Image: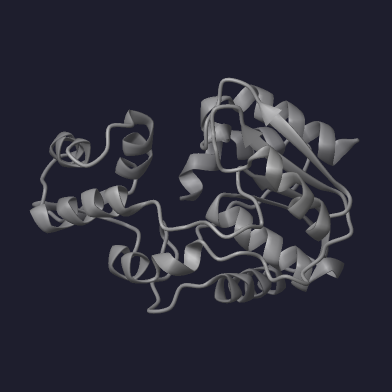
Amino acid sequence: MLDNWQALAKEFGAFFETHILDQRNHGKSFHAEEHSYELMCADLVHYLDENDLDKIYLLGHSMGGKTAMLFATKYPERVEKLVVVDIAPKYYALHHQEILAGLNAVSQGKVQSRKEADVILAQHFSEMGIRQFLLKNLYWKTKDELDFRFNLKVLSQEIHNVGEALLEDACFMEPTLFINGATSNYILPEDTELIEEHFPDAEIVEIANAGHWVHAENPSDFFDEVSRFLIY
């Protein structure tokens, strides 16, 4: 959800015109029955055209990073520099089953407080930071019932698409920065060769004291590394 980027967006806004987006089926963006990287790239093209944005710096985290990678390889003329946060262009097996089970339990439980929702989520996975991120998505569906803004039904059905690898022949020749969290296992040393095959002008930077949610866990170092890459 774009709300997770608000603080950093204000900092980047001192140097750039900055746009933060909810992808389809997330946040306040539209809900749809289909969810794929091809469609999210098409959504981004539409957004850029509607806002007269020609050539951009593009940054994406996790699923957003996969979208950003595919977009840059499909529309290289529209991306000057690319930043990919804690995701590689490889295939990822399904690994969010516990989180999805917890989210569906909350949705079916018709909770009336965030505390109540957190208790249910904690029965499925223990990581408090992840739970806090997810609980930001709760809103009052009715005056008596909280629900999630994201399209949980479709995301649960389409979760297999989220792990897809980048197309084998996809390539982006412009400067690219991959950022990974030091305690995350999403980008491994053995992924370097694959990254360089798809992105020959790539550098990989590790952020200390951070896991998968790098930008939230160590925003200061994250901002410094991204700013260095974009400005210089």
Question: Looking at the rendering, which quadrant does residue 104 occupy?
Answer: bottom left
Q: Position of residue 99 (x, y in %)?
A: 30, 48
Q: Residue furthest bottom?
A: 33
Q: Position of residue 24 (x, y in %)?
A: 47, 67
Question: Looking at the rendering, which quadrant does residue 97 occupy?
Answer: bottom left
Residue at 62%, 62% (x, y): give it. 67
Residue at 59%, 51% (x, y): give it. 20
- On the picture, is 122 further left or further right than 198? left
Q: Position of residue 52 (x, y in %)?
A: 75, 69
- On the picture, is 36 further left or further right than 127? right
- On the picture, is 72 further left or further right than 120? right
Q: Residue furthest top?
A: 209
Residue 194 or 116: which is nearer the viewer?
194
Quarter in which the C terminus is drawn: top right
- On the picture, is 19 further left or further right than 115? right
Residue at 62%, 76% (x, y): give it. 42
Question: Looking at the rendering, which quadrant does residue 194 occupy?
Answer: bottom right
Residue at 28%, 68% (x, y): give it. 153
Q: Is residue 129 above or below residue 6?
A: above
